[in-house]
Amino acid sequence: MSTRTTSLGDTVWDLPPLILHPFNERVPPSTLLENSKAALMLSGLIPTDGSDPDELTRRLLTGRYGEIRMLYFLGKDVFRWIEQGVDWAARTPELENADIQRQSFATLLAAPPPNVREKLIRWGVSDYVSIFSRAIGLNCIFSEPPPFPMLSEEFLRNYHRYADFLYQCYMESQPHRILAAANFRFDLYASGEYSKLLESEWETNG
């Protein structure tokens, strides 16, 4: 599927902010650590803790399911932002024939502006390219978080591979322009952070 990479000159446009809502499943960090250890034990990379293979598998699949839910909800926020971007581009006369599609905004998440990249790293999200792409991929097939029994063990074990291919299919489904951070700026906020920003602006303008 073809993409357009021709320059848009020196013009810089400001996009709507990407607002991420907290993922609250009430799962303590210790549980996430145990799930990760279970995967390493099953792979033989670290010694077992005495748990039988079935228990280790249960812990592994439970952990994978939690990751899928996290990525699903992240993807909902990302798709909300993408739709806002598409609506904004449609109302920007200079971009009328620029071939900006939904996929165009996904390319911007793969190479975000420096302020967004630096904030993600401060949040401890270094592999943001994989996280955003897998969140998009999972949202291409699920309209709601899938219940645990609906997912096969094969999918749970290797969901990241399936999500990567789903993202690839999404990106190849429509010709689109690749957006450069040099031309398109946006901010990244946690939802609580953005709410406080709005409150501050209202107080200032009130």
Image: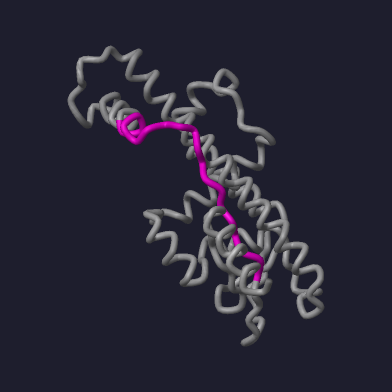
Q: Which residues are magenta?
A: 15-33
Q: Above or below — where is 6 with respect to 75?
A: below
Q: Is residue 175 visible?
A: no
**Residue sticking out furthest to the bottom:** 10
Q: For residue 195, what is the image quadrant?
A: bottom right
Q: Position of residue 160 (x, y in %)?
A: 48, 39
Q: Quarter of the image holding residue 10?
A: bottom right
Residue 68 lies, with reference to residue 152, above or below; the image says: below
- Residue 158 in magenta stretch: no
| Looking at the image, residue 57 lies above or below residue 189 | above
From what the image shows, is residue 196 above or below residue 54?
below
Q: Quadrant of the C terminus?
A: bottom right
Q: Quadrant location of residue 13?
A: bottom right
The spot of residue 82 in percent (x, y) is: 67, 57
Q: Is residue 125 left or right of residue 34?
A: right
Between 71 and 187, the one lying in front of the other is 187
Quadrant occupied by the N terminus: bottom right
